[in-house]
Amino acid sequence: PPFQNDDLDMEAAVASARPQLVEFLSHHLGWLLTTSRHFLPGMALNGLDGITDHREKVSVLLDLLEKAGPATWKQFAQYLCMECDLPLDLEILLISSAGEGNGALISCRSKCSFDMFLTSQFSGFAGRRRHHSSSVSDKDVKQQRLDSAEKYRHLLIDSIRQRYGSRRAAGAAAQEQTQPLAFSQAFVNLVIRHSKASHLKERMDKPRQDVAGAPEPEECADTAVKVSDLFCSVVPSGTTKVIFLFGKPGTGKTMLMHRICQKWAEGVLPQFLFTFLFEFRQLNLLKRKLTLKELLFDLFLQPEDSPDAVFQNLLENAWRTLIIFDGLDEFAANMDLSSSSKGGPTLTSRMSISELFVDLCHGKLLPGCTVLVTSRPKRLPNFLLNTVEFLLAEIWGFDHEKVEEYVSHYFHQYSFKEQAIAHLKSNAKLLSMCLIPALCYVVCVCLEYLLLKHQRSVELPQTMTQFYIKMLLIFINKQQGEHADGEATQLNCNKKAILGLCDLALKGLEDKKLVFYVGDIPEHVKEFASLHGLLTVFEVKTSGTCPEAGYAFVHLSLQEFFAALCLMVSRRVDKNYLKKKFSLKSKWTLKNEAKTEFMESFHIFLSGLSSKECRTFLMLLAEQDEAWVQDKQDTILQSLKKLAATHLTGPKVIELCHCTFETQDLKVAQHIGSLLNFKYEFKNFRLTPLDMSALVFVINSGQDLTYLDFAGCLMDIDSLEVLAGCNNIEHLSFRSRRCGNDFASALSKSLRGMGSLKKLELTGGSITAEGMTNLVQASSQCLQLEEINLQDNRIRDPEVKRVMDLFSRMEKLKKIDLSNNDLSLNAVLILAKEVIACQNAAELRVRKDTVMIYFSGPSGKVPRSLDLRWEERKEHVIPTRHVKLCLQDRSLSSQHAKEIVAILQSCPCLSEVDLSGNKLGDEGCSCLLESLPWIPISKQLDLSQNCLSVNGICSLLKSVNTCQKMMEVQVSLCHETAVLRFTENEEFASLPPREEPVFSTDDQQYGEENQTPTASKKIRLTDSRFQASDLEKLYAVLKECSSISELDLSNNYLGDKGLLQLFQFLPNLKMLSSLKLNDNQISLNSVFFLAQSLSTLEHIKRMNLRGNNISTTHGVNCSFPRVRSTSRWRSSFLAHPKHVAAGRCFRLRDCRVGPEDVTRLCQILAQCPQLTEIDLSGNSLSDQSIERLLSFLPYLCHLTLLSIRNNTFSPRCTVLLINSINLCGRIRMVEVRSSENAFLHLGASVRSQKTSCRLTDCAIGQGQIDELCRVLEQRGWLAEVDLSRNQLGDEGLRCFLDRLHRVPVTCSLNLSHNRISQDGVLHLINAFATSGNTAEVQVSLCSKATLIIKLTSRDDPRKILRLAECNFQPEHLEKLCLLLEKCTGLTEYISSNNNVTVQAAERLLHSLRKNLGLLKMSIEEPWVCKESVTNLLELAVQACGNITEITICKDKTLFQLGVRFPHCLEKVESVVSRLNLYKPEIKHACFYQRVREKCAQLQELRWSHVELHNDEAEMLVKILLPLPELKKFGLTSSSIMPTGIDYLIMGLQNCQAIEELNLGHMKLSGAAIPKLVLALCEMPSLKRLM
């Protein structure tokens, strides 16, 4: 039972009185000290002298009195009440903790009833106080008030016993089948859990979306509580305590409130003198305003006499008053902060119900009382959250144990009780339903009926809706007894009453009416509903007058069921109304504003009534055929499908799943499941097992695998059992602090049933090592599982060996995440050992709190043993295993070194080991490096950030000699880098761990000599800034590293001295081919020394010295790297590419080098064999230095590239660079960019090849032209001259063109982007017209600014002029025509968008002529597309010569002519004579005569996108097409009148010479196509048709 007799003991009573008692006695400290000496020994009071604070001293004294025992406290309490004038409420509480006279301590465990106890206390108290009171009249008043209050209290107890029944009455009622639903069973405890107001407020602030966020802290987890615990918390005196209980429909909230009242009446809650219960559904009926007194007395129970005295006593004892408000969600009015009365409310103030409720909760009325409120979820007004003392709890309903207890109670009188219990346990879906008490009752009713009728075969309904229908039919059937007819007959007999009840339910919901008066219900409906327990009757008080009878459905869900049924069977409800009523929108549109209907489960019932199983029931009730019912059902199903495609929050997805489950339609579920597949993310709301059942139904119905994510969701363990049947979950995630070991254990039982699960996440929980082991044990049975994520739990010291053994059995496992679990260092090391032993483990990645294990390859087939022999491995083909081990930032120290070595040696297949960020130090690293030859690492060992000194670095360098597989050592003290890289050697990797070296020193040397080829080794010792003493240690070690091929000592501040020391032992490093010495503070003399070393150290191929500060602002960078053959120039210019690989490169960068330095450097480099590349970038070379450098080019026999970047060149220097082509015959290209970068590419021999010169963006102007041209004239054999992006201008161009004829070569000149104007273009055209060696000119003055001239030999017949976007003005066009008249050798003229008008085009055609041959002319201008064909032909005949081609493309604005010279009129007389046979009567006879003459030799005629009028079509057919030389004719994408088409087809029949015909994209009618086919047959020369 929820209330035990020991719920309130003496300690609780003392604790509740403690604050007020301390406050009172602190003002009477002297009296208290004197009195205490009578109850406590003197020794106990000695420690009080040091306490100065009165309240603290009183508190200590009370502690001593309480510790002295119950008898001492009783005597003290009695004496205090007699001697002091205490506040009444404090005096009553003290009396409740002390007995009367006989010394018997009366506590909460006393068997006597509380009312008898209180009566005796009140009378005894009054008698004592008469002797000690100074005012007898005051005491009489107080006594009278107490008597009236006590009388009213008895009246309340009797009234509540009558209303809600004692335990005996409830038991008797349970025997009567006609009792309403709510009273038909003995009470069974409910599961109640504390919740957090802040968490719920967050949800209320965002009602449309379940709130995401971090999981709640451990202390915020909901905890189970007893009902009595809700009232036990101690609050400050005078503070109102609000308890808010919320729960889903049917969880027993109202039943619990009745139970609380009943238990209070039995004396179980002695802390409350008065208890009141109000139901919001009844308060909805009140239209008038009330005072607090009217609310309590008029609406609940009126005192028999002295109401004022009773009310006054109630005010004085407010802290002992309990007021219950049931069903806040059923309140029809708004409930917000504005409901609070303005200003301070008075006891006589009349207020609305909402104002009274708010002020009671805020403590403005009856301060200190306890207010208990119930509601369905989703309705929690803000003002409740803002109250000082606010307790929030949720009623979950039943758990499995409570279900069994309830069912056992229900069937206690039947022999088949155990059968009923077993039946429910065997059906998971049914058991989920029974977790809701109201549904549990419905299930029991149905199960009882079926077991009584068919004890062997019991088939229960599948859905909630079907259960309600079955329950209705059973209730009807029970009334008929043994003589009952069939269900259909019974339904017909009661149809009118059922339909009336449906109408009543729907009208009530629509009008927000949950309580009905007698006049609201037809008599036959009232009789039927009352008889079958569907309506409950009670007294309704709206004033102090006589109460009326009120009726309500026994549960709101039942009203929703009948309302939904009304929509499905009523003829008045059409499809549109049905769609409007079916919605998943939240019941509450705002936090404090209700919609017009109370429909929490309404849509679920509507969905359930849409199932096929309900069709017969609906047909009988509606008296309609199957088609009519199915039409309504389909309307609901279609609405459901549409809802799935909308944006739904997590709770709404669950509601939709409930609806889908109720339909039991697999096709609908499959459709909805496919739409919801990406929406299964649930955050911060509770899910019940019934919710999970509906969700699983939808997921299993779909065809796709799903991702199910629960973040911060509250769910009980029973919900996880439901998941076991979900086959379509691919990824399952839980994120909540509530997930502990019990949760993990429950989930483990469900995992095996999830056959498609690949990824499991339990993060942010409270799982410990034990929970992890259980979970992994279950997961190992899920062979398809690929990833397990357990990060952010409490797994501090897992059972590593057992867990890894389980992981090894999971064949498809890829990843385990154990991050943020506070794993100890010992656990991490054990984990590393076990990961290496696990044959399918591929990587362990640990960094601070990050711990991840990766797996690869088949598992479970390879034993977890390290004793496999090499021969056995060869016999069994096992995929090569590579293990990565990363133990970063875990505070590993030198004392862990041996353990790490043992772990590493145990794995024969390590690829990478990362121990960076630890504290191994020199000692730990040395221990590790000593064992390195017997640690088979194939790729890399990282020891960075391990507090290494120079001694530690020396140990690293020594490993180059001791470890054969060492490929590279990379060390930096400044960056704390220490990385060792290895070459892969499978045979070495397979060797077993050894305690002794594999080879002796001699063996090693012998082995190294016989390696073919020897693996190159590298040492990168950079950014360490060594001191002089450090260098001696390092050089001593480096001297022994004879096998290294590359040594990088950059940024170490070696200086000249350190460099000389280095070069003393360089000859010992026979394999060294690359030496880098960047940023080492060396001088230029050292650079010369290094350059000279190229002759003495032939094996050195690469040497870098960059950033070595010679002065305060400059540095030196010299290198001798191997030359790479990646340059596009080298591939074409080098005669012997084989020598490239053996070449050397010298790089001197970022230094000031004077002329003398250049001379000295070049003298040294000239002695260097195989020097193929010199780079002198960033050295600020002067003109003189450049000149000296170029003079040495002939002596650098193998040089292929000279680079000088980041060096500002003067115009004179640029010419010097170009002139180098005359100094060295091997130069193939000189390129200077932006006056800063120069590149000279040289060939392997002096054989005659063309040379390219590129001077781009070098500010070359008119002043440099003469000198430049003289250089070019000397060379003569040029391929390309690029002077683009300079500053020639018109004058510079003129000077260049004047000298151009002296360059008798074939080359391309690029003068683009040189600020050339139209006048410069005209000057270029003049040169083009008069020059014999200019083959082509291409000019564009738009943004491209192109100007290209191609020079060729004089016998080249081509002469092409291309002009584009030159924006010529009329004066320019006139000059252009005059210039073109002189150009008689022109073969092609192309003009595009040059602002040439029609008149200018006519002038151009007159100017263009040729001595002999073909001239092609193209004009692109916007006016081409606007002119008619006739006008364009008139333009064409203005051209000199005989026209051989006419092309008109209006889509490209192109007008093109081909003209042959000389023009011969005498040859066309016969043609004209033949054409005259047609004798066309045309207005423009002279024009067409001219066309005949000019086009007599026409060979090609192409028109595109033109519009032909009839006269133009006639001219085409009768004049142009019959021309004897016409070989090609095209008319494409053009429009022509139907009559013109006929003309065309007729004319084609007379075309004897046409070989190619193109009529593409012409819209020919169906009638024209046959005619065209006939015409084609008459064309004897036709070869090609398009």
Image (spheres, helix red, strand yellow):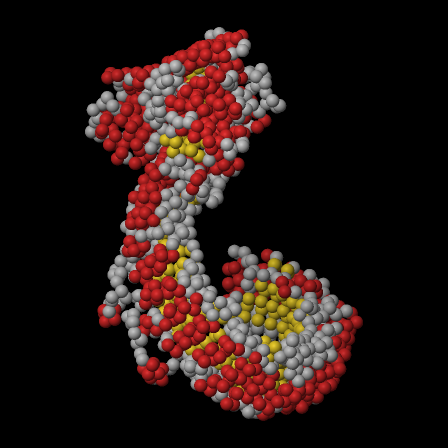
Quadrant of res 473: top left
Q: Residue at the spot x=40%, y=64% of the render?
A: 894
Instruction: Relative to 937, say whether 156 is above or below.
Output: above
Q: Where is residue 85 in the image (x, y as percent from the top left)?
A: 51, 17
Q: Nearer the viewer, residue 1493 or 1109?
A: 1109
Q: Where is residue 838 in the image (x, y as percent from the top left)?
A: 30, 60
Question: In this image, 754 relative to 362: left or right?
Answer: left
Q: Nearer the viewer, residue 549 or 513?
A: 549
Q: Nearer the viewer, residue 1423 or 341?
A: 341
Quadrant of res 1417: bottom right
Q: Which of 66 and 1393 is in front in this view?
A: 66
Instruction: Relative to 179, say whether 1379 is above or below.
Output: below
Question: In this image, 1431 relative to 952: left or right?
Answer: right
Q: Residue at the spot x=64%, y=63% of the render?
A: 1450
Q: Residue at the spot x=33%, y=25% of the render?
A: 1
Quadrant of res 460: top left
Question: How many discs appear?
Answer: 0
Q: Can residue 20 be seen in this view?
A: no
State the residue lying farthest toward the right.
1371
Q: Position of residue 542 (x, y in %)?
A: 50, 14
Question: In this image, 1110 relative to 930: left or right?
Answer: right
Q: Can residue 123 be seen in this view?
A: yes
Q: Position of residue 53 (x, y in %)?
A: 54, 31
Instruction: Relative to 1051, say whether 1572 is above or below.
Output: above
Question: In this image, 721 relative to 1338: left or right?
Answer: left
Q: Residue at the spot x=69%, y=84% of the render?
A: 1183
